[in-house]
Amino acid sequence: MEKTILKTENLTKSFGGLKAVDNVTLTVKENSITGLIGPNGSGKTTLFNTISGVYKPERGKIYFNGERIDGLAPYKIYEKGLARTFQTPRLFQKLTVLDNMMVSCRSHPGDKILNVFLKKRRWSEEEEKLAEKALEILEIIELDRFKDKPASELSGGQMKLLELGRVLMTEPKMLLLDEPAAGVNPTLARRIFEKITQLRDELSLTFFTIEHRIEILLEHADWVYVMHNGSIIAESPPEEVVKNKVVVDVYLGEA
Amino acid sequence: MSEPLIYVLDMAVFVGIFAILAVSLNLEYGFTGLANFGKVAFFMVGAYTSSILANMGFPYLACITVATFAAGFVGFVASLPALKLQADYLAIVTLAFGEILRFIFKNEEWIAGGVQGITVPSAITITGVPIQTMMLIQLTIVYAALAICYFIAQRVVNSPYGRTIRAIREDELAAQVLGKDVFKYKAQMFTLGSAMAGVSGSLFSQYVRFIDPYTFEPILTFTVWMMVILGGPANNLGVILGAVFVQALERGARIAKDYLLLPVDPHNLRVMIIGILIILILMYRPQGLFRESKVKTPALEVASKWKKRS
Amino acid sequence: MVVVNWLQVLFNSAVTGSLYLLAAVGLTLTYGLTRFPNFAHAEFMALGAYAGYTIAEQLKLGFPYSFIAAFISSAALGAASYLLVFRPLTHRGATIIHLMVASIGLDFFVRHLIKQVWGGEQLSFRMVWPYFDVGPVRITGLWVALILSAIVMVGVMHIVLTRTRLGKAIRASANNPDLAMASGVDVEKIALVVWIVGAALAGVGGLFRAADTRLVPLIGWEILLPAFAVVILGGIGSFYGALIAAYVIGLAENFGVVFLVMFKLSTDYKFAIAFLILILTLILKPSGFGRLFGEGGKVV
Amino acid sequence: MSTILKAVDVVAGYGKLVVVHKVTVELKKNEIVVIVGPNGSGKSTLIKSILGFSKLFDGKILYENQDITGLRTDRLIRMGIGYVPQINNVFTNLTVEENLEIGAYPKKDKNEVKASISEVYDMFPVLRQKKNERAGNLSGGERQILALGRVMVLKPKILLFDEPTASLSPIAASQVLSYIREICDSGISVLMAEQNARKGLAVSDRGYILVDGRCVKEGSSKEILEDKEIGKLYLGLKA
């Protein structure tokens, strides 16, 4: 059986009495693409924010790679190899596309103040290597011709792509993707998920992704969780989700 | 000020001293996005530390070194509570901090003469040389210090580190989830910026040879802000030119008063012009005269070669 | 051993608190509504004081007229600040840091304009106020007028905020500007009213301060820090929070001064007491007293 | 029936992100029109773009044959357009009655305001019971009713509603929707975005289905409800 990489136990987070995440227990298998679906306001993004450390959970535990990570600062969770994207891209607007990619490097020697002065040669070499890598990723997501442009000049869809490319720079173990294909055209959406599958296979990454297009998940996901009013109400392989009466009801509304 | 050469040299020295402050504020605000409204506090720490040591007979090199570290240390300590705050709170707290510090120097005569101020020995004491030569030496010292600060600042901003602080300025949360210990970077930049302000304060005190609490009013902080905003935030060369421009303006206001017989007090006129210009720049050219500089690292070169390949 | 007249200290606290309340009400309301701390608020106080001085001392028209002059001149300055500086800046997408720096620029401009018009030297009101003793407490007519003004202001503001269409629109706009717009409220017009009233009250505060002590161009700047302490302790945008905070800081300062004297420190450090409260509030409970009156301190 | 509101070829979104691509929606007098669609399909964005709360990149908004594209929100409200946002739709620091008073802000005559508030109380008795309660203390369902009451004070000609049943219990949701039906029967045309497609379609006259910011189906609600393909369409499967 595959190993579990992420596990939450009774995770709860509320805002002013409203339980946005209510007693959520779930597991994500290593090297899988796991989908998370659910209607608006069902708590998907809050769940991601809690896992990635943006919010502190009120109750419950989060294990990543066997280690407790709940309550850690976001940057520490990232250092452990768990990265995320946002629903509306949060790019560094005035930085170039290439710099946006480069910022996300983990343990870059030139990212420490003393090394900036003392180890210029070392970080310069590393910088060259990382720049190559960044450009290769940019080529894959077809943004390499914008490399010198400020991120603010990209279109909405390109911004989503850049945000995805940015987290790929870091060689994370696992990625939380918040609607990676929202606002991009259907062809590109499909390609994004093909890319995700390819990355999973080539780099043995794990993806946990919020996505509302079931047809995409049908093709690419291994497992799907369904969230409603803060709780997980169903989990199954994607092809069964569409048949699940509860899920269809939640989405379409009770008759 | 009858002799034009002396006047020009004097202005050049002031430009140098303020350019150091502008570069230091640029590291904090222009690159990292920190609203330090108390720049003058760290300048003051540098000035007083250096002056007190000089009066005790220490050589100038020791004075300026200790002043740098003292200002940096005060900056570091102040940054610990302050940098956890949002931009608006940070501004209020740093501004108030500068004022409190000034009050302490004003009230505690035993530190440095209180309101009476203290006279400060010049860094260089050679007898029998003409004033022009003395000023040239001053100029050399100040510009050597500016060169070092500029070099340090450029090295910092043209590095992966410099990229990270800009990212923090653009979006703190995104930087955090990309693994950056935001607080650490902010504290380091605040400390470095404060240390540079200490250098500037030390140079200032030995040049004007007298300091008192009235030297360190908040207007000084905002003169530096104007240099940064006018020159172009996140452009080190730009803010130095901003320093030249603002100095020229200040002197211009004085000359205008002398020669045009304006019915306005030159000091009032100067501050009023600065106040209005700050507003006008923010309204009509908030990005400043010079655009933000690029992050210059070997990555740029790799990127330019990439162009040829595809 | 210093003999302390504690009742007098208590009364003085009410005087200081009333002053800080007048000074801070506009600051907290504009901060809550336009979402940035306006450092130029200091000069709303200063202009009111100088305008009042001209009427009372140079034109010899008496205190009631100088009160009106302070009110009107500062109101005009508040309107001009919002219409000519801050509203255009906001429309151009200025950041909060830009707005703060601009407010400092405006502060310097107005302060030195005042200096140019009235001169930089210290001026004082020659008006003589009757004084009388109630038990061990010395009371002057000016202090009574100040406290009464604060009480009337609180009463009027309370009625306006809770009973009138305008006041409710102010509270609604501070709570949820988008929804206020979606209810047909012209939020910018409401903001303008708040700027005018807030500035006018600051002008009156400045006048009282000047009449009580002396008049220098820095008069407003000197009250700005305690005013910020009131705003932050009270919770940004909270009128009732400011009401409590003003008297808390008034008490802290007056009792603090007693201790400063006991420890033979300069009384100038009372300035630092407000700073200390401000820092502690920010570190311990950034929402201040505002929480007492509703969610997130946005209560008015 | 004549058209009262028409949004033509709307391209809308936030910042630089385009969420709605060239969608045309029409609202006739005395009807309820519902916009349904999966998450992120742009239904809320479309409603918001009419009022200026999201960015309208292209397209035109016509109201009573007048071009109202780009008009300031508070002006639109005064012209007879009511709007209930999805979240933050009450003033939490104001009492229930004060919320209604702000809803009546454009009216200046005190007695008129009182009368219309009293009418709203008759319509929603629960609000009368809680009139001195701070709105922040209301339950989700009560808030939604208050939000409804707040727009009804002005008796708008049309009502724009953004996901009226979001995060409500099934009972509260049904109640809110039946209120919306009543409102429409009293002569107000309603355009709403609704996540609960079945319920939304059940109370409405016509519907639009949005997927990925494009309109994939429009027609009478009955027709859409009976369509076997709708489930697939709605869950984002191919049309």
Image: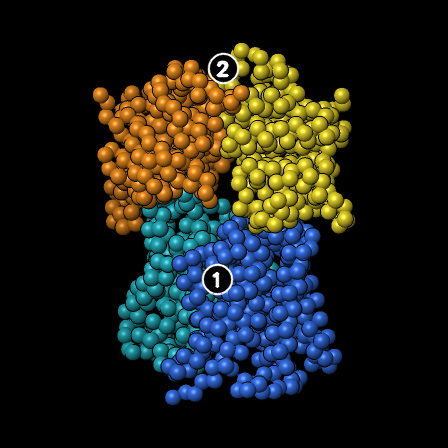
Chain colours: A orange, B cyan, C blue, D yellow
Q: CA distance from mark 2 to mark 1?
A: 56 Å
The quarter of the rendered structure image containing the N terminus of chain A is top left
Q: Is residue C39 above or below residue A229?
A: below
**Residue C127, position as x, y percentages in the image:** 66, 84
**Residue C132, position as x, y percentages in the image:** 61, 87
Residue designated by label 2:
D232
What crowding class fits label 1: few (fewer than 14 Cα within 10 Å), some (14-19), or many (20 or more)? many
Q: Secondary structure at mark 1?
A: helix
Dot 1: chain letter: C
* Side of B8 relative to D65 (left or right): left
Q: Give the residue at x 62% y 18%.
A: D221
Residue D84 in view of the camera: yes
Pick the residue in front: C191 or C38.
Answer: C191
**Residue C105, position as x, y percentages in the image:** 56, 61
Q: Is residue A33 above or below residue C203?
A: above
Q: Amino acid at mark 1?
A: Leu
